[in-house]
Image: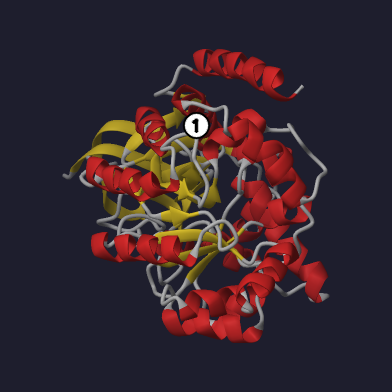
Amino acid sequence: MHRFDLVIENGTILTMDPQERVIENGFVGLKGDTISRVGSVENPAPEAAKRIDARGGLILPGLINGHTHAAMTLFRGLADDLPLMDWLHHYIFPVEQKMDGDFVHTGTLLACAEMMLSGTTTFCDMYLFEEQVARAAREAGMRCLVGEVLYDFPSPNYGPPSEGLAYTHSLIHAWQEDPLVSVAVEPHALFTCSPDLLAQANQMALDHGVPLIMHVAETLDEIEQLRETYGKRPIEHLHDLGLLGSHMIADHCVHLDHWEIEKMVQFGVKAVHNPESNMKLASGIAPIPDMIEAGVTVGLGTDGCASNNNLDLFSEMDMAAKLHKVHGKDPSKMDAGTVLKMTTCEGARVMGLEREIGSIEVGKKGDIIVLDTHKPHLTPIYNPYSHLVYAARGSDVRHTLINGVPVVEDGRLTMMDLPAVLARAREQAERVRAWVL
């Protein structure tokens, strides 16, 4: 008789493995942080130090938020209904200049609470004071890939642009052995970073074997700026600088042509789709169906709360599927299974973590969520993939496990003092009001 540290049982498992197995009345056995067995419920039940009863619900891999700015939870609703460049230059950049590490730490804790409660177990972050982002995620028990945003102008964290790469270098070394925190090199965008900075950032990523992440082709204004400055389109500019490669993750990718998509496929560049943010800022509709059909690995992200305004990946999946159906005038576009893969197994591939997370398989880490399906809007169930994308909400998540640790049980956080985090967030909001209102 096998003994497990934890067993999740009595639910339908959507493994999201290469065979796309769905296991009715299934169980997952974990030893430490690792999945040790996946199968149908056994009789007698295997011994376990702890048991989680899925109560007939859905068991699936934890969701992966491929692109966000976690601490921007504290800017939620600050400057809505504005164009991206106006939003950035007249509101976001000015208030960010007044932030400090404590602000970012608090905002990240708030984001982690929101994400874990709604089934997200991993997030990829680009922001300022990323050491505090890493510490907050570790404190919350959440998996993350983080990187300090690099600009050609002074940062409120590291100061002059010349210090940004040094700060990133220190992050890589500080967190290289951590089981939950990974580090990337993250120049902001092609219109805020010089070719020299981009080249240095790329070399650092290659030297340390970590991802290179940046915003790419998000708006028409960006396309026009690059044409005026370099006479090139975004992917062409990156290609000529020698940055394209399988280590690169391009966020947004709203305005790409066929040649650029082909180059991404050729060099193995991965992408993250952020439909709600792109819609809210009227940036446009990314050619995601074309990218996936061509062979680009695509994940899904929420972007930051100042341009979304939530971190609920269930909402994001629903929007991603429907946006491309209406845009392509084809209801078969972006089917539910494809979209769910973007937040699980494909999202893991984007982040280079496919050997650890993204599916429920023996040997992978215990990043698992359980949804309560005993609700009117989830009854009856004919197709669980369809339900997860079109009907489920973040509030339907009942249990969240990260690295084998239950961080949410029966809808309650176990690793965080939520009232204390909310109180700290309200205090920080008073600072924001003093800065801009």
Number of numbered discs visible in the structure rendering: 1
On screen, 422 above or below 395? above
Occupied quadrant, residue 207: bottom left
Question: In terms of secondary structure, where does tag 1 sit?
Answer: helix
- Report x, y in % for residue 408: 46, 30
Residue that numbered label 1 is attached to: 108
Quadrant where the C terminus is found in the figure: top right
- Percent x, y for residue 422? 57, 17
Decide if residue 310 is in sight here.
Answer: no
Q: Nearer the viewer, residue 49 or 361?
A: 361
Asked if residue 307 is positioned above or below residue 39 in the image, the reply reads above
Q: Residue furthest left?
A: 1
Residue 288 is at least partly visible in this image: yes
Q: Nearer the viewer, residue 390 or 254?
A: 254
Q: Is residue 188 above or below residue 298?
A: above
Query: Would you say 192 lies left or right of 90 here?
Result: left
Query: Crowding near pointer 1: few (<14 within 10 Å), some, many (20+)?
Result: many
Point out the image quarter for the N terminus. Answer: top left
Residue 47: x and y in percent read 23, 37
Colour option used: secondary structure
Residue at coordinates 44% horizontally, 42% vertically from top-left? 160
Residue 101 position in % (x across, y down): 45, 27
Question: Which residue is more in the foreground, 86 or 253?
Answer: 86
Q: Amino acid at mark 1?
A: Thr
